[in-house]
Amino acid sequence: MKIAVLTYGTEGDTRPLGALCHALDQAGHASVLLADAATLASTQALGVCTQALAGDIRGALGASGAIANVVAQSERPGAAAKALAAIANTHAAAWLRQTVQTAQGCDAIVCAGLAAFVGLSAGEALGVPVIGAGLFPLTPTRDFATPFIPPARVPRWLNRPSHHLINTLLWRAFRPAVNAARAEVCGLPPRRRLWTTHPMLYGFSPSLVPRPADWPANASVCGQWIPPARAWQAPEALEAFLAAGEAPLYIGFGSMTGFDARRMRQTIVDAAAGRRVVLNPGWSGLDAEGLPPNFHVVGDVPHDWLFPRMALMVHHGGSGTTHSAARAGVPSVVVPFAGDQFFWAHRLAQAGVAPEAVAGSRLDADALARGIAFADRAEVRERAAVLGARMRAEDGLARGVEAIERALAGTSVGRRA
């Protein structure tokens, strides 16, 4: 089968979909991934066919970009929804036009992230099946609240309504631009209601989020979508640092920007209190010059190589980093900034492998030091090791490919294949 896969977001959004494309190719299908240009390198390294979508996610996340205020006001889900929708709405027509052109002759479209509504519209225009993909749960359930509201704010009886509320608010934020693009590009009528009947595949671990019993049959939890390990040789300086003493802390906030980088740097230095640290500045703008000698700065290092060598992880709680840390069998200290990061922080705390999170906007050295002390406990390390072993036994990519094949088996696509 030929499958077009569409997503828009940061590297953490694109990389798992690239891994899924590679797995589809290995299973004898032919995939193409459409995503932001700055996030496609790891997918291209796998030999997957890619196309760059219009937009600049890194610029939108920069200090003067659309997301900067969201990070500064990290616990306001409405602000996040509005800012994210603004990015997608700017490019809705261009994305839809490119997706329709690329997916001509394809048997299915898989869509995710900020481009999900565009992918669903493209499938409607082309008359091909569409499968949704997610890295956090979007399907309403009584088991937990929507990932876009910090868990402590929602009483249990409001769990399911919270999903419907946020999903509806998101759709209302995207709907005008999506409907304008549908009319302009495809001549489609306006869409009033959310799509709800298409299959949904989730690339997160059932060890962290078991599949809710009240989910419909069209929602599947596959496990983490991880690119295959690549041949990689650590720089001599990193090898020497790791060999020179006890396992260090890892500190990195991925693609998060918009916070006070100078203040965060001092917070990190003070909280580490002389302990060995591997620091990955990512997109944060943290100044790596003149750090104390107990710090070693790295760039893009494969998580599956680095994380098992760490004593514990201090990170932002993105789905990918959360899973990679847990899979490595090491504890976490989560400093969430926006979106679903509060949800993943709560999940790790529930598993007993992380303390309760402190939002990035309120983090100080004392709070971070307390989190590090919690994660350093022997019983926390033991729980993390058990969780890691369980997650390493999962094969999310195999389950994802099987779920796509199963979803298409009853269609005319399945009968042709």
Image (tube, rainbow, N blue to C red):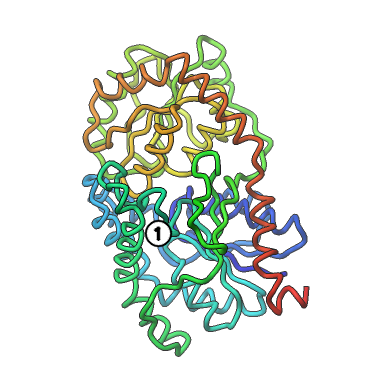
Residue kind at label 1, given as amino acid type: Asp
Is 82 rendered above or below residue 330?
below
Q: In this view, does 160 lie above or below 414?
A: above
State the quadrant of the N terminus: bottom right
What residue do we see at 56% from left, 22% from top? Answer: 309
Q: Number of callouts in the render?
A: 1
Does residue 37 appear to the left or right of 93 in the view shown? right
Q: Which residue lies furthest to the top in this view?
A: 245
> At 30% from the left edge and 54% from the top edge, which residue is drawn?
158
Q: In this view, does 122 lie above or below 388?
A: below
Q: Is residue 13 visible?
A: yes
Point out residue 94 in the picture as x, y percentages from the top left corner: 44, 75
Instruction: Determine whether, in the image, residue 202 is placed left or right of residue 115.
Output: right
State left or right for residue 57 relative to residue 361. Answer: right
Residue found at x 42% / y 16%: 376
| Res 51 seen here | no
Residue 296: x %, y % from top left: 44, 22
Q: In this view, does 66 lie above or below 283?
A: below
| Residue at the disc numbered 1 | 56
**Mark 1 closeness class: few <14, some 14–19, many ≥20 residues within 10 Å:** some
Dividing the image into 4 quarters, which one contains the C terminus? Answer: bottom right
Name which residue lies at 62% across and 79% down.
104
Q: Is residue 404 left or right of residue 288?
A: right
Secondary structure beneath disc 1?
loop
Residue 212: percent from left, percent from top? 49, 51
Give percent across and percent down for residue 23. 69, 53
